[in-house]
Amino acid sequence: MSFTVVTTGLKFPEGPVALPNGDVLVVELLRGTLTRVSPDGTTTVVADLGGGPNGAAIGPDGRAYVANCGGMIGTEVYGYVFAGGIPEDYTGGSIQAVDLDTGEVETLYTECDGLALRGPNDIVFDAHGGFYFTDHGKSNDLVSDRGRLYYATADGTSIRKVADDMNGPNGIGLSPDGTRLYVSETYTARVWWWDVTGPGEIVGGRTLAGSGGGNFLYGSPDFRYFDSLGVEADGNVCVASLATPGICVVSPDGALVEFVAIDTDGDPGITNICWGGPDMRTAYVTASSTGKLLRFDWPREGLALGHQSATA
């Protein structure tokens, strides 16, 4: 599938959010910023966030809510940039909210029930104005955290754990009708789902595996790691694929619809996808290891997120 390079020179971009005016927000994990990308490729820093901003979504108040992992170490291998590990200045993860007009940053959450957030990764709002987010955890050459899922309110007053014992939970999304929650696991290259029975209430449990008690949807038979995900209007789950770079499109019943291979200077770090444009058929993909934002004419319509039109 052909694509256009919108911009280059980003410092490990993630979490794209398409805005109604044609701009795209990205977080730059290794720069610590929320950055606005114009259609002509011009970039403007909206806010300096510190740590390691990893995912973003527009909330009901029009602010950009950011899952901040607290930072990672940038490493260059064979000319490609990778992010991982625990930097020396790491102090913990957080959920932040950014006013897109002023750049003002509010830190909403740094812990839940006395347990510090370790590595918040990605975030999705529901129709009730609350949001789910993944905590990927942190790892080094000796130990690795078990990941968790949380649900929180946008006003900063309520957060609770909804699942745990996961192996690198990364991308997160809701089905078009809001009745399913999807999560991709990085290291297993699997996608799991739960029934949503109320705001922040999820039910799984149809498998003996760990992974937070979720129901198994799809596992890759090929060598790859899974990063973030997006959902199409027809309910397909589009998961960004690392190592074997591209997008795995998976149906709600777990069938592989297609694999969209993406080759941009051999970048192995395809990390995120979102949609915008008047018909929601313009897909934006982050190629993180070469610092690019890509634009595609997507063959199917992307899901319009609940608060995506809340701001320009």
Image: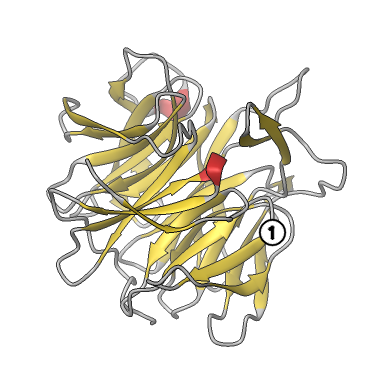
Residue 23: % across, % down? 39, 73
User: Colour scheme used in the picture?
Assistant: secondary structure
Q: Residue at x 54, y 87 (%)?
A: 101
Let me know if residue 89 appears in the view. Answer: yes
Q: Nearer the viewer, residue 38 or 16?
A: 38
Residue 305: % across, % down? 29, 63
Quadrant location of residue 279?
Answer: bottom left
Let me know if residue 156 appears in the view. Answer: no
Using residue 266 as the reference point, say whether residue 256 is left or right of it: left
Q: Nearer the viewer, residue 264 or 103?
A: 264
Quickly name the residue at label 1.
32
Using residue 228 as the reference point, say whether residue 86 is left or right of it: right
Q: Nearer the viewer, residue 234 or 258?
A: 258
Q: Quadrant of the N terminus?
A: top left
Q: Residue at x 56, y 59 (%)?
A: 27
Using residue 217 as the reference point, say whether residue 223 is left or right of it: right
Would you place residue 240 above or below residue 167 in this image?
below
Q: Residue at x 44, y 49 (%)?
A: 286
Amino acid found under the numbered disc labelled 1:
Gly
Would you place residue 99 above or below residue 40 in this image?
below
Residue 17: % across, % down? 41, 63
Quadrant location of residue 199?
Answer: bottom left
Residue 14: % across, % down? 51, 51
Using residue 251 as the reference point, say whether residue 68 is left or right of it: right
Q: Nearer the viewer, residue 302 or 144?
A: 302
Q: Quadrant of the C terminus?
A: bottom left
